[in-house]
Structure formats: C-alpha cells, structure tokens
Amino acid sequence: MSTIRVLVGTKKGAFILTADGTRKNWEVNGPLFGGWEMYHLKASPVDPDRIYASQTSGWFGQIIQRSDDGGKTWNPPGTKPEDLMGPDGMPKGKSNEFAYEGETGTHLFFDGSQKPWEFKRIWHIEPSHTDPDTAYAGAEDAAIFKTTDGGKTWKELSGLRQAKGHLWQPGAGGMGLHTILLDPTNPNRIYIAISAAGAFRTDDGGATWKPINRGLKSQYELPDPDADVGHCVHRIAHHPSRPDVLFMQKHWNVLRTDNAGDQWTQVSGNLPSDFGFPIDVHAHEPETIYVVPITSDSLHYPPDGKLRVYRSKTGGNEWEPLTKGLPQKDCYVNVLRDAMATDSLDPCGVYFGTTGGQVYCSPDGGDTWTSIADHLPGVLSVEVQTLS
Amino acid sequence: MIRVVLPFHLRNLARVESEVLLEVPPPITIAAVLDTLEARFPVLRGTIRDHGTLKRRPFIRFFACKEDFSNEPVETRLPEAVINGSEPFLVVGAMAGG
C-alpha cells in the first residue's frame, strides 16, 4: 500500500499530513517551526526522505531547513559539528546567505524610480530530478539560486537578471520568483516565473535566460499590453511527459503554450473568472488541468462565495466546476499560487490549501473533495509525495 | 562571562533554553558579543544582522541595563554590569504592533 505525505507550508509553521493510499484517514503532524512563515517545503524526487524547507520571518530573515529522514528531524544544512568551522576557523553558517552576484543593479519600483535588488526571502525550492544535493531556490527580490551541496551554500544564477531586470517591478505581493520548472528530459532547460516580471527560460543550465511572454496580454496592468516583460504571471505548470507544453495562470487569463513558451494562447474559455493563482496538471492525463477561479484582482475570494475548482480535460477552453465536498456558500478564502499539488496514484489525487487554513484532498481526480485539515494557519504552499 | 538573552525563535534555532553564556575577548563591545555569539551558534548568522554588511536587521533591538543600544555604534563598549555578568545583554525582536 502506498503512503501519501502532504507537506503544508503556512503563515505560522509547517505541517505534514500522512495517509495510506486510500487517502481517507489523515494524521496531522505539526506545527514544525511554529510561528515562522513556511513559504515552501519540497522533497527530492530521487531521495524522498530529503525535504528542503524555506523558513522566513520579517524579524529574523531567511532560514533554510533540511530533513534527511522524511520530516522527522530537521537541521539548517551545514550545522552538523563537522560542518561548523571552515579552514580559516570561521563558522560557515552559509545556508541562509543568498548573495546577489556582481553588480546588484536596479529594478523598477512603484514610484517609477530604480531600486537596488534586496534579498527578502525564498518563495520556492525546487530539488533536482537527479541529484538530492542539488536544488534551486526562487527569491524575492527576484532571482534564482542553486545549491549543489545540499543547501549548505547557494550561488545565484545571475544571468536571469540580465533578461531586462531593470524593467521588472514588484507586484503588491512582492517581486518574488515563485515557480521553477525543471525539464526532466533536458537538464539545461529550466522555466521560471516572477510576479510582475513574467516567465523566462534558460536552455544552457541557467547561464542565460530569455523572456517567454509572447501572447500574454496585460491591458489593465501594463501601458503596453504586449510588453516583453512585466506581466504578472501567477503560476506555470507542466506534465513531465510533455515538458514543452506549459499551462499558465496569469493575473488575468489562463494560457497554454505548446512550444516551450515561444508563443502563448489564451484558454480561459468558459471559466466564470480567469483571475486566480494556482494551476496544476493531472498526474496521468497531460491535457487535464485544474485552476481555482477568484472573483477579481480586487476581490481575492471565490465568485458568489462558492469554492470551486475548475477542471479542463481538453487542455483548456472547456472547463467544468468541481464542487462535491467543497463549501458552496459563504466561502471567502483564497488559494495561493503554490498551494495546489497532485499525487501520482491512480486515480490521481488533487490537493489544495486555503488562506483560511483548510487543506482539501480529492482522491478521484477532482470529482469529490474532503477536508483533511480544517483549522491550520493560512496555507502558503502544498506539495505531495507518493511513497511506495 | 557575558549573559545573552535571545528571543524565543532564536533560542529555538540555536537550541538553547535560557540565557547563553559567552566568553567574549575584550574589549567587550556590541560587535564582540555578536561575533562570539555567531561563532558559537553559526545558525544565527544572518538572523540578527545581515550577512556581508553586518548591519542590524531592522526589527532587532539590543537592550542592556534598561538602555537601548540598537542604534549605537557596534564598537560601543557595553556597561560594566554586562561585562561582570550581573546584567544580561538582550537581543529582542521589535514589537510588531497590532
């Protein structure tokens, strides 16, 4: 029997939810790192017991935590006794040092001025498909960092900021690099997305990057709706069997590309609102995708107080509401961009967490839903591990 | 020995339960105490002052002997009561309001 482990990051700590493959009875463990904002936790695909976590605080800054036993114990990487002192006798303590490379440069700010890049926090950690010691971290202010030593040290892939970084500007939630997609068939290809900057791709392992925003239209957000950069991309997702096919939930609009981002096409179709944050893909059906429509950019809650996931089995345009088990009145929560995930069982399980602290599971691809945790702090991220 | 009191979250990070006792080489300044603290607990690097610049993080405060040392130069020598261990040096998370 398989085991499902759900890693939940919240505004006040992390929680680990486990169940067997029936996904009926859930055990909730936590809070881990109580009181801290846990932006994201994600496990290595090649070593499921290795989990990376981003722990942040407005007071105390950024901490990276790592578990090597499936979440039972945690340490900031590099703080074991043998790691503590460098050859010069100085403490290392580098796992939370995210230093921008070279000339920091500036980005556009709300008032039209240029502002220097300033590190604030890690939004997302994406472990490598092949090496448990390698992972990528998405930062606010937007940048991507890479570790090859299990998180003890991080180095910026600074070529990203050369992709018109001076024109990026923070959205209301900050200029965060929130999505990192690794191409499982091509280790040199990585996709990332940044709030209020757009989507970008590297084909040389992160040395150089280019904007991939053609087809995005932001008529209410940008003076030039077709600008090369500046679009507020909320999330992108792909299926590992077709890494060149990407799906995007933008500030407004749901889009897809079939050529690795060279051209995007709107697929909002019959959605009641095409504003939202998360988007994800079914584990076994690459054309089945999920979004959670939110009323508008001004009203960050579901239309009509009804929490509905929308599923398209046609890769967009034709959408159906999924409501069984979800609150259909008086519900005014949001689902944030990193708070939806799928397991790889058959039938595929779909999971999401809300700003109201609920975590929902559908063990049947979205047909029916059950709350598996009801009263957590506001959920920032959800990741799922399918363990044999 | 210098007594240092850390806020709740930093005590958890450092895995200490109460005051930290540090042997700080003279002159005993704010910087000397922080250098010694971070050498003993590398996990605290970056949580009290920034990497690189070593500037105090905005929402961290330093108190001792009912005085606020947060904005004093880090070369400031700490009061005799801290140096002789009768008073602690407090690292405090600033009030958040609300």
Image (spheres, coloured by chain):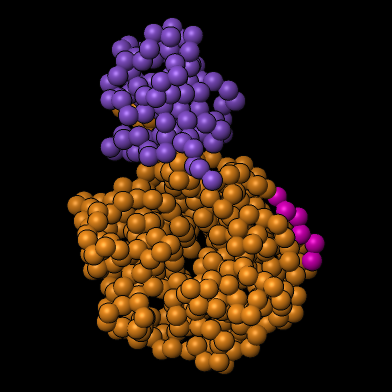
Quadrant housing residue A285: bottom right
Residue A303 shows up from this direction: yes
Q: Is residue A242 above or below residue B21?
A: below
- Which chain is painted in orange? A
The answer to whether residue A363 is left or right of residue A168 is right
Q: Is residue A12 magenta?
A: no
Q: Is residue A303 above or below residue B49?
A: below
The answer to whether residue A215 is left or right of residue A385 is left
Quadrant housing residue A61: top left
- Residue A238, given in percent of the width and then of the height, sits at 49, 76
Q: Residue at x 38, y 56 (%)?
A: A140
Residue A78 shows up from this direction: no
Q: Is residue A129 above or below residue A240?
A: above
What count of labels does the image hold? 0
Q: Residue at x 46, y 36 (%)?
A: B94
The foreground one among B79 and A280 is B79
Quadrant housing residue B60: top left
- Which chain is painted in purple? B
What residue occupies the far right of the structure in this picture? A25
The foreground one among A140 and A100 is A140
The residue segment tinted magenta is: A24-29
The foreground one among A89 and A372 is A372
- Residue A371, given in percent of the width and then of the height, sits at 73, 66
- Residue A47, given in percent of the width and then of the height, sits at 56, 55
What residue occupies the far front of the structure in this picture? B98
Q: Residue at x 41, y 73 (%)?
A: A233
**Quadrant of image for the C terminus of chain A:** bottom right
Q: Is residue A325 above or below residue A168?
A: below
